Amino acid sequence: MDSSIVGFTAILGALFAIANPFSGLPFFLGYSAPLTSWREKFTAAIITSATIWVGATVVLLAGHAVLSFFGISIAGLRVGGGLVILISGLSMMNTKVDDTKKSGRSLARVVHDLVRRGHTPHGAASAVHASSPEAAASLREHAATSGDDAVSAAISHAAKGEPSPNAAAPDADAERKNKKAAYLSLMFPFAIPMVLGPGFMSTILIAQHSNGAMPVLGAYSIIIGISFIAFLLAAPIRAALGTFGMNVLLRLVGLIVIVLAVEIMAAGLVKLLPGMAG
């Protein structure tokens, strides 16, 4: 088989494992919860995917210049980036989708992000609570155990389906502001740095050094296209996989990421310490 095809396939597999669009679906559902219509969900998927693509392209174009400025070698990047990727893989292996305590804390952070961008605590909690049955269970658990009185009260009202005690009828301006806040939250912190994080960036730079820019550009464009479809169909995919399917998928991808990290680190160590090659 043509070595260029093998190289492109390896880049594609590595970037898919690192990006893993399916593991981020619960967070995407949380951040996009205030967006209710199909058109808004489509726009959310476009904005999120475009943000990841633009960020990845900036890394591709300027990443090596930044490394040169700081005097960082590719071998050093392989070791350091491989370590970051290894930690990411270990985190996937140790994460449970049905861990309501951890999930509750994570989704409460989503609520805080939405509130910081203009939502009322009750509105943000209600939207995230309604995003999926698992989110509702996690937020109820968080409401029962958290010391965050304001958000816990809002979550408790949302879980019971009660209106906020002090909530005024939403007007068109407030609704537009809330939707804008949701779009901004999908750009940051969801797209960057949750999806396009250190592991993704390191993989782009390492692959670019070995294979050139165009194969890497093509590979991450395909991965981001797959991510766009996953974001667009986030709710049905999440429902179809269920808790068990999400946990199996997360561990399978986590194992692949760990193996990739070891390979990347080993290649870097051989360059830094030639004696290790025998």
Image (cartoon, rainbow, N blue to C red):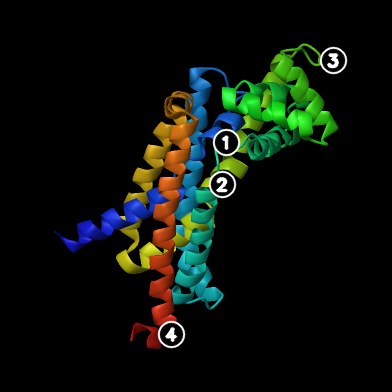
N-term mark: 1 or 4: 1
Mark 2 element type: helix
Question: What amino acid is labelled 1 in the image?
Answer: Phe
- Crowding near the residue tagged with mark 4, few <14, some 14–19, many ≥20 C-alpha atoms within 10 Å: few
Q: CA distance from mark 1 to mark 4?
A: 41 Å
- Disc 2 and disc 4 in contact, CB within 8 angstroms: no
Q: Which residue is mark 2?
A: 194
Q: Which residue is mark 4?
A: 273
Judged by depth in the image, the label closer to the viewer, 3 or 4, is 4
Question: What amino acid is labelled 4 in the image?
Answer: Leu
**The one of 153 and 185 positioned closer to us in this rendering:** 153
Q: Position of residue 109 (x, y in %)?
A: 70, 38
Q: CA distance from mark 2 to mark 4?
A: 33 Å
Residue 147, picture quadrant: top right
Q: Position of residue 101 (x, y in %)?
A: 67, 37
Determine the residue positioned at 60% across, 37% down: 99
